[in-house]
Amino acid sequence: MQHTSRINEAFNALKKPVERALYLLKLKGLDINFENETTMDAEFLMEQLELRESLAEIENNQAALDELDK
């Protein structure tokens, strides 16, 4: 029964590139669980906050939105 379960798991993982990569990492002992991963690069998070603030400031300004689109 365990072999059948592992075969099904592997087959499903092979259908999707990201799941295939995660499966291969798991086989090597690296179990990555993105749903529970809460750590990120602080620089990336700060950039996202700044972008959100910029968008909030220009939300109703069509000229600024056009400039941002460029």
Image (cartoon, helix red, strand yellow):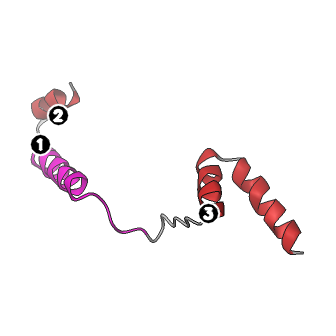
The part of the image, by quadrant, that contains residue 2 is bottom right
- Element at badge 3? helix
Q: Nearest the camera: 44 or 25?
A: 25
Does label 1 or label 2 sit earlier along the sequence? 1
In the picture shown, does residue 39 fall above or below 10? below
- Residue at the front extreme? 28
Q: Which residue is mark 1?
A: 58
> Residue 5, how many percent across, how many down?
82, 69
Provide the residue designation for mark 3. 26
Q: Amino acid at mark 2?
A: Leu
Q: Nearer the viewer, residue 59 or 44?
A: 44
Main SS, magenta region, reads helix
Asked whether the beta carbons under mark 1 and mark 2 sit within 8 Å of each other, the answer is: yes
Q: Residue drawn at (17%, 34%), measured in percent from left and top?
A: 65
Q: Write down the region rendered in magenta.
A: 37-59
Identify which amino acid the numbered label 1 is placed on.
Answer: Ile
Q: Position of residue 36 (x, y in %)?
A: 45, 71
Q: Nearer the viewer, residue 48 or 58?
A: 48
Query: x, y (%) of residue 70?
Result: 20, 24
Q: Residue at x 65, y 51 (%)?
A: 20
**Quarter of the view holding residue 67:** top left
Q: Which residue is mark 2?
A: 65
Does the magenta segment cover residue 46?
Answer: yes
* Label 3: few (<14), some (14–19) or many (≥20) C-alpha neighbours in 10 Å: few
Q: Is residue 64 left or right of residue 42?
A: left
Q: CA distance from mark 3 to mark 2?
A: 44 Å
Residue at image x 80%, y 66%?
6
Q: Is residue 33 left or right of residue 68?
A: right
Type of residue at label 3?
Lys
